[in-house]
Image (spheres, coloured by chain):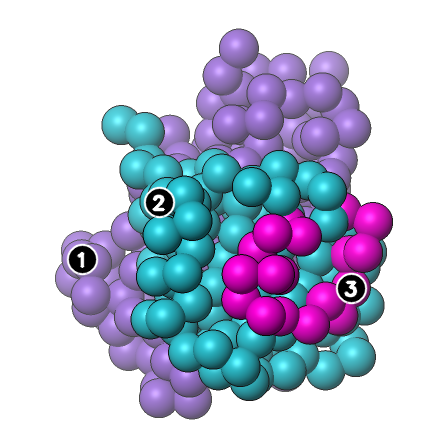
Chain colours: A purple, B cyan
Amino acid sequence: MSIKLHFDVSGDDFTRAGEASGKIKNTLKELGFNPETVRNVAIAMYEAEINLVIHAGGGEIDVEISPEAVTAVFKDEGPGIADVEKAMQEGFSTAPDNVRNLGFGAGMGLPNIKRYSDEMDIKSTVGVGTVMTIKVLNKQ
Amino acid sequence: MIIKDVAKILDAEVLCGEESLDREVKSACGSDMMSDVLAYVKNQAVLLTGLVNPQVIRTAEMMDMECIVFVRGKRPDAAMINLAEDRNMAILCTKIDMFTACGKLYESGLRKQEREA
């Protein structure tokens, strides 16, 4: 059995970035998931949600929760990532200064997502958009 | 120590979370870079920061932190306080700067907890 949830993420309201991740965190807590799994999902999703807002002008998130794992797919029609390998390097960032002033944009987002997820896949086309899938296994 | 002790040591004003002042806290971290908080800390109860925006509250939420201390006289707005109240977090404000605030708490026994491998 699995639960599927969908979220639309607005690209013009930085203050609301994190709402979807917070909701998923609460849902997983209510479902009785292991606290470490809950936190890993919350952090990985939160960084990805922030990315949707600061880089892609918003997008959508589809989350599937099963007893074994949580899978989240982030879709956007943003500028795309020219060099995914480079973007994965800690410290590499294309974020503008105003994002840095908000406490993000230090080239930590994608590495953080990788750190907290068990599987991560990025498919991106410049000028078309990006689809990122992250999977966190439920630690028993 | 409990959150009430943190407030006392830092001569801080409690903006919300009065009901959680007796909660015990063992570890803390200080940072203005939220991605660093998300990357390197685990099981920290207290976040000290000079950054003021709603993502500070959200970051603390994702990390299961219970108390946020705004240093060097920074003050969150009403929207941020509401966000923290909804998440049962305590918000403290101190005029003390980051370095000194961290030093005072360290001296009183709070430590950084390393991320597990």
User: In this picture, is B22 found above or below B89?
Assistant: above
Q: Which residues are magenta?
A: B3-20
Label 3 – label 2 distance at C-alpha: 24 Å
Q: In x, y percent, where is residue A25?
A: 66, 40
Please determine if labels 2 and 1 lie on a single subunit. no
User: Dots 1 and 3: beta carbons under 8 Å?
Assistant: no
Is residue B99 left or right of B105 when viewed as pictured?
left
Dot 3 crowding, Cα within 10 Å, few <14, some 14–19, many 20+: some
What residue is shown at x 56% (from left), y 41% (from top)? B1
Is residue A54 left or right of B87 when viewed as pictured?
left
Is residue B39 left or right of B69 when viewed as pictured?
left
Q: Is residue A51 visible?
A: no
What residue is shown at x 78% (from left), y 64% (from top)? B16
Q: In x, y percent, where is residue A128?
A: 42, 71
Quadrant of image for the N terminus of chain A: top right
Q: Amino acid at mark 3?
A: Cys
Q: Which residue bears the numbered disc 1?
A: A89
Label disc, if present, on residue B112 of the rendered structure = 2
Q: In x, y percent, where is residue A28?
A: 69, 31
Does dot 2 land on a helix, a strand or a loop?
A: loop
What residue is shown at x 35% (from left), y 88% (from top)? A97
Nearest the camera: A85 or B64?
Answer: B64
